[in-house]
Image (spheres, coloured by chain):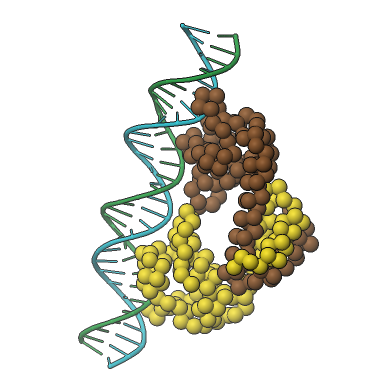
Chain colours: A brown, B yellow, C cyan, D green
DNA sequence: GTCATTGTATTAAGTGATTAGTACAGTAAC
DNA sequence: GTTACTGTACTAATCACTTAATACAATGAC
């Protein structure tokens, strides 16, 4: 699962989003050690400064704990992790409705299109 | 319905998206006159150059016709408009599934959350 | 103590987006 | 012809993002 930089949004924001996803889905387990900035920067192919900015976001979210000289670790509070996962999911749902509304689709029509997409499992 | 610049994506991309939505939803009717660059730029509070770049996208989409000295007009081909509207909607659906997958939700779970959101019509 | 690793901070430079300002050519109205 | 409006083009300046290259202090391993 590599980092993907494709948007025209700032790289550090994209990194923050992808790291947030990794954390709430358990790629980096609760309470476990978190990779050092330099290592993540190398993996993503970006400057350590850029990665650091992304990590700052995750600390603000309460997902990461920083011990200045000991490195970072994922929070042990699993309810924080699960809460963040649900919150992110809920935000996606509302974003979806909002986007579809600008295209002239009601919530009912938007839901129907998703249901269609669910049945056509052909997409990966 | 004002323009909204909030993302960290380039402004002209956000403008293009919002104008595309206006066109496919009939805010600017098929075959009708399209507002001049300077007017749209003033409405959005951006530089005419920036708005022009956005309009270039819509021409590439085939939504706008440009007569260099006569101004622009919306395409008369309504099937192009409706096709674009459906295509955009379909893209949103797949984006939604893709985003939810990164959060660990299957297509079925993602559809269920949308169905929940549909029933809670409280959100506008 | 020595060394490597950690997060963090700093400065300088490069890049792309955006703005500001101006200009030009073609068309319509008068 | 004159005027106003159209899309378009160009240059210079500004700003945020990003990179590069360091440097520092604290910790653990040896």
Quadrant location of the N terminus of chain A?
top right
Whether C22 is drawn above or below C30: the answer is above
Whether A112 is drawn above or below A124: the answer is below
Q: Does the rendering let one see residue B42?
A: yes
Task: Compare residues C18 and B67 and report the one nearer the observer.
Answer: C18
Q: Does the rendering let one see residue B68?
A: no
| Residue at x 75% of width, y 52% of height | B106
| Residue at x 54% of width, y 52% of height | A7
| Residue at x 69% of width, y 71% of height | A109
Relative to A89, is B38 on the left or the right? left
Whether A67 is drawn above or below A113: the answer is above
Task: Compare residues C5 and A6 and report the one nearer the observer.
Answer: C5
Relative to A48, is C9 on the left or the right? left
| Residue at x 60% of width, y 41% of height | A19
Q: Please identify the quarter of the rendering in which residue A58 is found.
A: top right
Q: Position of residue B104 (x, y in %)?
A: 71, 47
Q: Please identify the quarter of the rendering in which residue A25 is found.
A: top right
Q: Please identify the quarter of the rendering in which residue A16 is found.
A: top right
Report the number of numbered marks: 0
Q: Position of residue B89 (x, y in %)?
A: 64, 67
Q: Position of residue D19 (x, y in %)?
A: 45, 38
């Amino acid at each position: 699962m590599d980092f993907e930089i494709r948007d025209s949004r700032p790289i550090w924001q994209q990194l923050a989003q992808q790291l947030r996803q990794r954390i709430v889905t358990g790629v980096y387990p609760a309470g476990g050690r978190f990779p050092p900035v330099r290592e993540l920067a190398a993996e993503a192919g970006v400057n350590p400064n850029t990665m650091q900015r992304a990590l700052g976001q995750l600390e603000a979210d309460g997902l990461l704990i920083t011990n200045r000289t000991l490195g970072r670790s994922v929070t042990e509070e699993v309810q924080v992790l699960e809460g963040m996962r649900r919150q992110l999911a809920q935000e996606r749902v509302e974003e979806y409705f909002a986007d579809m509304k600008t295209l002239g689709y009601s919530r009912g029509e938007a839901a129907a299109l998703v249901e269609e997409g669910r049945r056509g499992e052909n997409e990966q």
